[in-house]
Image: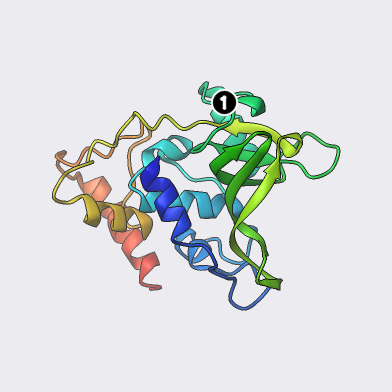
Amino acid sequence: MERLITVARQQLGRKEEPPKSNKTIYGELYRLNGQPWCVIFLWWCFVTAGLQTLFYGGQRTASCSQLLSWAESVGQTVQPREARAGDVLFYNFDTGRAPEHCGLCVERTGTIFQSIEGNTPLPEDENNDGVAQKPRRLSQIVGVWRPKYSDCTDFDGRWSYAAICEAIQDGVLSGYPDGTFKPDRPVTREELAQFYVNLKKMLGR
């Protein structure tokens, strides 16, 4: 959890380029640039922190609704009044209940939650969106995902840890549907073919 929060804090102030374009390094790596990216930013943080197997079962989504529905389906949600640092908060800013936005809770004081969010207005540049820390009220929260931080990745602590994280972040490699990476497992010809296709996409060929 501390590693994830550190990664998110290091991105504070990063902006869309060009302004109001939804174009970011996060969308570029996800290969869905130019689209709303609050969930994509969280995916990037989990991957960079080496916790990608915790995010959406090791898979990808750019949808607040899908991410929250998945968290509910695997029993990883808590009530908004129980939210704390390390939880992912989902918000609705009008009278609805559908999640419209999300962020990573880094601090709580009473009913006010400090949340690091992507795709949100920047306090120092109101004409652009980026990564910022925002105070959110309990009344705005419609869902809370509490990741199972105790479930470490199966390559945590290995000499190849940084290389594996970078390969997953770039989209060249991915884990298995059960959330594992299996770093000692031999590569099959099928997997090698998929690696080749992923590499070509990364290189733009």
Is 144 placed above or below 45 here? above
Q: Percent x, y for residue 98?
A: 75, 37
The furthest residue to the bottom: 18
Q: Is residue 131 left or right of residue 174?
A: right
Given the current orientation, which residue lies at the most extreme top position? 75
Rendered-image quadrant of the C terminus: bottom left
Q: Three-letter amino acid code at disc 1?
A: Thr
Please provide percent x and percent y for residue 113. 63, 41
In the image as oriented, which residue stretches furthest toward the right? 95
Q: Position of residue 171 (x, y in %)?
A: 37, 57
Residue drawn at 64 percent across, 53 percent down:
134
Residue at image point 24% right, 36% down: 154
Color theme of the render: rainbow
Residue at screen point 54% across, 53% down: 40
Task: Using a 10 Å C-alpha cutoff, classify the residue at mark 1 as few (fewer than 14 neighbours), some (14 to 19) or many (20 or more).
Answer: many
Residue 71 in sight: yes
Q: Is residue 142 above or below residue 117?
A: above
Q: Is residue 46 visible?
A: no
Snapshot quadrant of residue 110: top right
Which residue is at a point 26% across and 47% down the rendered structure image?
191
Residue 177, given in percent of the width and then of the height, sits at 38, 34
Rendered image quadrant of residue 131? bottom right
Snapshot quadrant of residue 156: top left
In the rendered image, which residue does mark 1 sit on? 77
Q: Closest to the observer: 20 or 106?
A: 106
In this rendering, would 91 be left or right of 196? right
Is the residue 22 above or below the residue 155 in the image?
below
